[in-house]
Image (cartoon, rainbow, N blue to C red):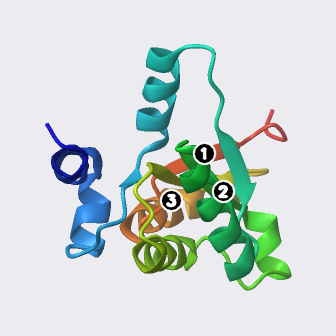
Amino acid sequence: MSNNALFQKALEVGRPPNVQKLFPHSRALLVSGRVVDQALRKKGKAITMAANGRNFFVIRGALQAAQRANAAIIIEIAKSESNYCPVNFWNIARLVDGACNELGITIPVAVHADHYGIKSESDVVAAKSEIPTLFELGVTSIAIDASHMP
């Protein structure tokens, strides 16, 4: 099977339903964090970079570096960074997808919501509606930080 055929197959089976629905004509291989983890385990003795995509330049640079290394990458943003960065939970997937398509990125990319903080019961209530929305907006992985909860 040619590299192009393999990439086509990866686009068909690797992109989660939320990404397929949101970006139906995209050629970006946005995958779940689980896919990246499984690939690393299969490869053995491998690591992947998680880059804080605080702005469009960082996202582009990290994607280009990962493409050059032929390595999967996680582009992430923390909830706290939305207070001072142009990239946030709500727009990161769209920016990553756009950059992947513009740059011809063919490596797997997870879009990660990092440090989703839950510090109180009221945060739990908010999270129940907010977290599904993040996935609807193209996020493919999330780390919930409930370390402040009893």
Q: Is residue 118 above or below residue 100?
A: above
- CA–CA distance in space, label 3 to label 2: 30 Å
**Residue 14 sits in quarter:** top left
Q: Earlier in the sequence, mark 1 or mark 3?
A: 1
> Which quadrant of the figure contains the C terminus?
top right
**Pointer 3 or 2: first along the chain:** 2
The amino acid beneath tag 3 is Ile
Residue 20: quadrant of the picture: bottom left
Frontmost residue, 116 versus 78: 78
Q: Nearer the viewer, residue 102 or 15?
A: 102
**Against 70, is 99 above or below?**
below
Nearer mark to the viewer, of 3 and 2:
2
Looking at the image, do the residues carrying marks 2 and 1 touch, with CB atoms under 8 Å apart? yes
Q: Which mark is residue 131?
A: 3
Residue at horizontal 22%, vertical 69%? Answer: 21
From this view, report whether residue 6 is shown above or below residue 126: above
Q: What amino acid is labelled 1 in the image?
A: Ala
